[in-house]
Image (cartoon, rainbow, N blue to C red):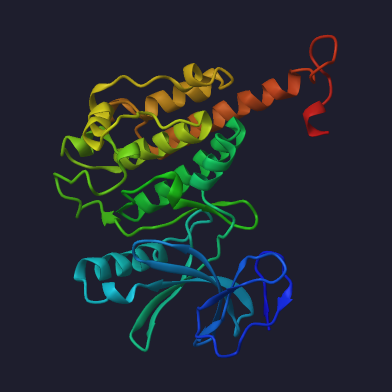
Amino acid sequence: MVTCPNCEAKVFIPGDLPPLAVEQCKRCGHSIMMPMQMRQFELRSKIASGGQGKVYRAFDTVLERLVAVKLMRKELESDPVALDSFIREARACASLNHTNIIHIYSFDELDGQRYLVMELADRGSLDSRIDHNKRLSELEVLDIGTKIASALALALKHGLLHRDIKPGNILFDADNEPKLIDFGLARSVEAVPESTTVTEGTPYYVAPEKIKREKETFLSDMYSLGCTLYHAVTGHVPFEAPSVEELVAAHVQIQLTPPNQVNPEITQPTSDALVQVMAKNPADRFLSYEEFRIALEAARGQLLRMQYTQPPPGSKGGKSKTSWWRR
């Protein structure tokens, strides 16, 4: 008997099913997986699947907590590039202790199967939230931006660049905290070559200097974070084109449309901060994550003041003397 991860009904499934095989829940039709034991970890349901492997929701029977277990694809075990990326992700995340960076608990191997055990963040990605809601509220985007900028600042303090910031690499946990994941492309600041390839990263969020094969710095990650926040708050990626070649060229050549021209509800301070962080010339961006965070926090403060003083819809008169928006 297993518990359906969707409706939480107790369901009987055939005992001869192999581990990780799935059947449909008889009550809601959701997929139910035959659990698999890996040392003290009981893999209970699949969360996601990617190029490197599959991620499962699991239960640590020793510490009695829910975790995520990422199994590397068997066919990649003999690929030195893929294996290096998998190990780099484990080591990079394990070296960083930040609320908004996914925590790595263990990296191990069992019967030839390599796997990562990490903090569980199974409440969707920023990418899925954009798909579902079209765009997020400005206040939520500012909160996410402030936290991820802080996470990147810590990574930089430890000499690391993430190099693949995008909505799909920001997950949310049960407390709605954003978690930066996937350090598979991460490099130390010193190890990043003078010229890089555009294929490393995602074209919708790639920095102009990377396209031009100029030196990549933390300002490249900052630009990608700006693109990510732009997408979240407007519902549109900063640049769109029919081909990858035209898309990457747009990052270099096409002037950015300010966010508040795409969505007039966005306040000027938020729009200005995103325009600056996405400047074509890295020297024109914020010169530190702290500066970027201060700009986002200032925009958030002004937005909250506007919400505080703006009367509720349908009311008469001017400024409200009470915090109506907290009701």
> Dividing the image into 4 quarters, which one contains the N terminus?
bottom right
Q: Is residue 253 above or below residue 245?
A: above
Q: Is residue 13 above or below residue 131?
A: below
| Residue 314 place in picture, x, y as percent | 83, 16
**Depth check, front residue: 45 or 302:** 45
Instruction: Say whether residue 43 is left or right of residue 249.
Output: right
* Camera sees residue 323: no
> Dividing the image into 4 quarters, which one contains the C terminus?
top right
Quarter location, residue 320: top right
Q: Residue at x 50, y 39 (%)?
A: 145
| Residue 243 place in picture, x, y as percent | 26, 34
Instruction: Say whether residue 29 is left or right of residue 271.
Output: right
Quarter location, residue 206: top left
* Camera sees residue 3: yes
How many numbered marks appear?
Answer: 0
Q: Residue at x 73, y 77 (%)?
A: 10
